[in-house]
Amino acid sequence: MFKILARINKLIFPSFTKQGLDLAKAKKWQLAIIGYRYYITSRALD
């Protein structure tokens, strides 16, 4: 299930690392997306 969600996230959500986003200057919603993507990706790798 997490592998499917990881693929959907890759298509839907923007990649902030490619945009060069500084985490110290990120907005709350950007941090929420980063946290969500991290959670799903870490679960998909297990």
Image: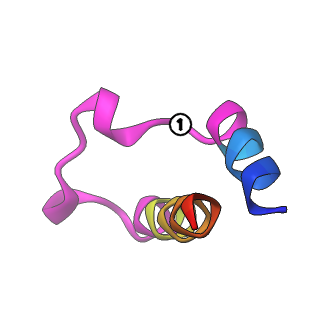
- Asked where in the image residue 37 lies, by quadrant, the reply is bottom right
Would you say 9 lies left or right of 42 here? right
Query: Is residue 28 located in the magenta-colored stretch of the structure?
Result: yes
Which residues make up the magenta segment? 10-32
In the shown orientation, is residue 30 left or right of residue 9?
A: left
Q: Is residue 38 left or right of residue 40?
A: left
Image position, residue 5 (x, y; %): 77, 54
Q: Which residue, given by chain and number where applicable, does mark 1 sit on? A: 14
Neighbour tally class for label 1: few under 14, some 14-19, many 20 plus, Cα within 10 Å: few
Query: Could you tell me which quadrant the C terminus lies in?
Result: bottom right
Measuring 63% from the left and 37% from the top, which residue is drawn there? 10
Which quadrant of the structure image shows residue 23?
A: bottom left
Secondary structure at numbered mark 1 = loop
In this figure, what is the number of numbered marks? 1
Give the residue at x 50% y 65%: 29
Please say if 27 is above or below 18. below
Kindly indicate the quadrant of the structure image that contains residue 13: top right
Q: Position of residue 15 (x, y in %)?
A: 45, 36
Q: How is the image coloured?
A: rainbow
User: Residue 44: horizontal and vertical position, in percent?
Assistant: 63, 60
Residue 12 lies left or right of residue 28; in this view the side is right
**Main secondary-structure element of the magenta-colored stretch:** helix
Residue at (77, 42) in percent of width and height: 8
Q: Amino acid at mark 1?
A: Pro
Q: Indicate whether residue 46 is drawn in magenta.
A: no
* Quarter in which the N terminus is drawn: bottom right
